[in-house]
Image (spheres, coloured by chain):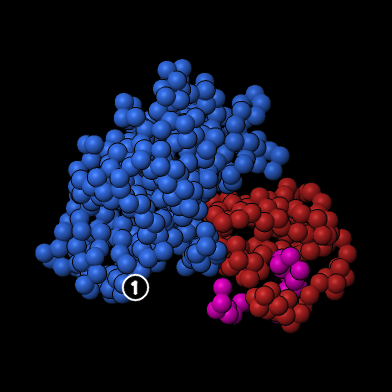
Chain colours: A blue, B red
Amino acid sequence: MVPFAGFEMPLVYSSILEEHRHVRARVGLFDVSHMGELRLSGPDAARLAQRVFSNRVDTLKPGGVRYGVFCTPEGGVIDDATLYCIGPEEYLFCVNAATAADDFAWFTKVHGELAASCALRDETARTALIAIQGPEACEIAHRVLGAKGPRPRRWRFAETSFQGAPLLLSRTGYTGEDGYEIYLPAEQALSLWSALIDASRGAAHPIGLAARDTLRTEMAYSLYGHELDRSIDPLKADLARFVSFGTGFIGEEALMRVRDSGPEQRRVGLILAGRQVARPGTAILAEQIIGQVTSGTFGPSIERSIAIGYVPAQYAAPGTQLGVEIRGRRIPCEVTETPFYSRKT
Amino acid sequence: MAAKKDYEIPEDCRYTQSDEWVRIDNDGARIGLTDYAQSELSDVVFVELPEVGSQIEAGEPFGVVESVKAVSDLIAPISGEVIAVHQALDEHPEWVNEDPYGRGWIVCIEPEDAEALDSLMSTEAYRKHVEERAAS
């Protein structure tokens, strides 16, 4: 167990490699209750959501989920989040644990500036989040939630109940595998966890934070504090498809300037020639140091050492030969298309 | 980790504070990482080996073990010349986890001073060293 953003979090249950491969081959359960939940409800909920969120809100219908970021006026990323449209006047943001308090303060400030008529609630402490991910995940969840239970499609969610408590079943994830992220009151979390384990008849293994990180790194999903922070804009971070211009979100004007001139730096995926691990902070080399690794690991499913980092735009084309400096030695690497891993379906 | 594990600590080896083992066999002094060390590191994915013919010095790093989680120096238990390195670990770094005292051996050296082993820990002393850390 390791402390993380005020929670005691499981880092590894058995072995990182085993846990990782089990999710890709079968199914894994993640307790990610540390994630923050911020609810907006009232006539101006959509207006406030759009002001803080880079992706488009007005076309998001009840039952829809969308990914995006919150930006500073300068275009730096305050956090990344998924937005749930519960109803025309009700939205839920799922945000990172370590940044939830900053997000809430930011929302409160913007709420004041807009004189918005909507309530703002931080539901992090009372909300649990269990992710079930892997090829067998949906089937197991359906067993627990009943044959007549909802079966939302990708990037959709449904509200249902479990043992009388409200439950939000979201067909999303952070692993690259199919599955659900399930929000429910903290009191029911343990029962749901046990029910999923039992219903899986031994197939579902608990997965720690470490394997969650190797799974997301193989998918080249950003992790706040690594690929994203207030000094990085979403265009440079390869998140242009989650930025919707013309919606009036804070940071839009700054990002238009970045879009028009082209980002000076870009996020790239790297595959190393050796099996050494390029840890965060590792220098990326061309003729000299040109950038830094933000995430790096051995990719258990692709069996290659992989890294994500930022380099000047002229080095960002897939196929570009670069190096990383590990313990004073230059290890060759190649800029590659991401995700590193793609599911065989 | 709260659960107390029963680590394998064979009687025919000597041990270092930094969790290497040494065993004298027909080839020379064979060196590897202990069961405790491999368990703490978990998921070894890369072992950086010294060159055959190079000299390693007691107390000095001679290689590196990388796991998914962490990177750790290999510290020479005794001084000597490297007479063999376990090249198969390039392909099978997981052997360090699976069989730390057997297939997971890392280098074999010709000891400069055969009596240097006497300064290292016995099984019993090393067990205490492991338990002290497991308790903290």
Coordinates of residue A229 in the picture (x, y in percent): 52, 40
User: Which stretch did the figure color magenta?
Assistant: B1-25
**Residue B63 in view here:** yes
Q: Is residue B16 magenta?
A: yes
Vertical relation: A168 (above or below) A74: below
| Left or right: A163 as drawn, with respect to A331 | left
Q: Quadrant of residue B38?
A: bottom right
* Element at label 1: helix
The one of B103 and A2 positioned closer to us in this rendering: A2
Task: Return the chain for callout 1.
Answer: A
> Mark 1 = which residue?
A187
Q: Amino acid at mark 1?
A: Glu
Residue at image x 38%, y 46%? A81
B82 lies left or right of A312: right
Where in the figure is residue B17, as x and y percent of width and height?
76, 69
What is the x, y in percent for residue A24? 35, 55
Q: Is residue A189 left or right of residue A300?
A: left
Q: Residue at x 41, y 45 (%)?
A: A107
Q: Is residue A219 above or below residue B23?
A: above
Residue A147 inside the magenta-drawn segment: no
Q: Nearer the viewer, residue A4 or A296?
A: A4
Determine the residue located farthest toward the top in the rendered image.
Answer: A261
Q: Name the dominant secondary structure of the magenta segment.
A: loop
- Residue A114 horizontal side relative to residue A15, left or right: left
Specify whether residue A320 is in view.
no
The residue located at (54%, 51%) in the rendering is: B91
